[in-house]
Amino acid sequence: MLEGKTALVTGASRGIGRQIALTLAKYGADVIINYNGSAQRAEEVAQEIRAMGRRAETVQCSVADFEACREMAEFALKTFGHIDILVNNAGITRDNLLMRISEADFDAVMDTNLKGTFNTIHHFYKAFLKQRSGRIINLSSVTGILGNAGQANYAASKAGVIGLTKSVARELAGRSITVNAVAPGFIDTEMTQAMTDSAKEAVLSQIPMKQVGQTEDIAETVAFLASDRARYITGQVISVDGGMSM
Ligand code: NAP
């Protein structure tokens, strides 16, 4: 499905990003694994991909850093010659009631989740235009669609990702470049394992399918959007949430 394609996945050292990198490789893509702090875990993902017979490289870069993203894009384009698939997955939470969210915690979430998505797209934009093809897939969240008490900063960043996705999709549609968002619901990763049991139960009660999602559920959707099968889908938000947002 993705033979001969190349991809860069941000935040691919752990969780959903790790599974996306492995799944793209499973379908034939060579993958650049971006990480921020987890160098060893990123290298383990790269080794798993190499064991599948695909190429894999790791690159440290905080997506919140505009100039570092420029260097990462240059590295990726030099390493693989071209990048077909850009997955903006890196994300953080700093949950609290709005009155208790510090300015630093608001900025950190916006800088990573929203500006980080802008930063990478900005630096790949020209290359995508030139090759007249490409897939950009941005991770939003059910929280960006519905809002969530205690997550105003996170919800704002993920709603922002949706607006950014649709705008860039309109800019690039004429060059056969698709830009879509995937909005996960409640997925079993370190991000959600950090929640209290009562918070987890409260979320579970809102899921019509009555079960948490797995990283594979998100990764398979991303792989589909990255493939030629999804060539006519752009500017969409695909919810993968067990029915939470319906
Ligand atoms: P996670 O387990 O906490 O992993 C986060 C990943 O993002 C790590 O690989 C981390 O890298 C990376 N990262 C964080 N800050 C970064 C930065 N500044 N620059 C580059 N990489 C950075 O999170 P997850 O649950 O897999 O979530 C992945 C994405 O899905 C996020 O955008 C999240 O908002 C979204 N999402 C998740 C859920 C869920 O239920 N889990 C639901 C909706 C949406 P290092 O370890 O190297 O620092």
Image (spheres, helix red, strand yellow):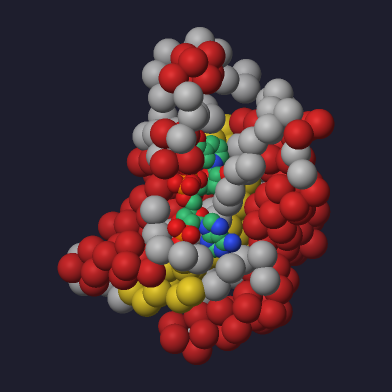
Q: Quadrant of residue 2?
A: bottom left
Q: Quadrant of residue 46?
A: bottom left
Quadrant that contains the N terminus = bottom left
Please identify the residue farthest to the bottom as the structure is shown.
Answer: 78
Image coords of residue 187 (percent x, y)? 45, 33
Residue 96 in the image: x percent, y percent?
68, 32
What residue is rendered at 52% in x and 85% in y? 75
Residue 243 vs 115, above or below: the answer is: above
The foreground one among 47 and 222 is 47
Give the left or right position of residue 25, taking residue 20 as reference.
left
User: Residue 107, can we see it?
Assistant: yes
Q: Is residue 176 visible?
A: no
Left or right: 4 with respect to 51? right
Using the rendered view, name the quadrant where residue 31 is placed: bottom left
The x, y position of residue 52, in whole percent, is 20, 65
Query: Could you tell me which residue is drawn at 49 percent across and 29 percent down?
Result: 195
Q: Which residue is depicted at the point 55% across and 72% down?
A: 61
Relative to 157, is 29 on the left or the right?
Answer: left
Q: Residue at x 79, y 62 (%)?
A: 171
Question: Depth check: 73 or 116 in front?
Answer: 116
Residue 159 position (above or below residue 37): above
The picture places residue 178, in percent across and down from the top left corner, at 64, 57
* Count of numbered labels shown in the rendering: 0
The quarter of the rendered structure image containing the C terminus is top right
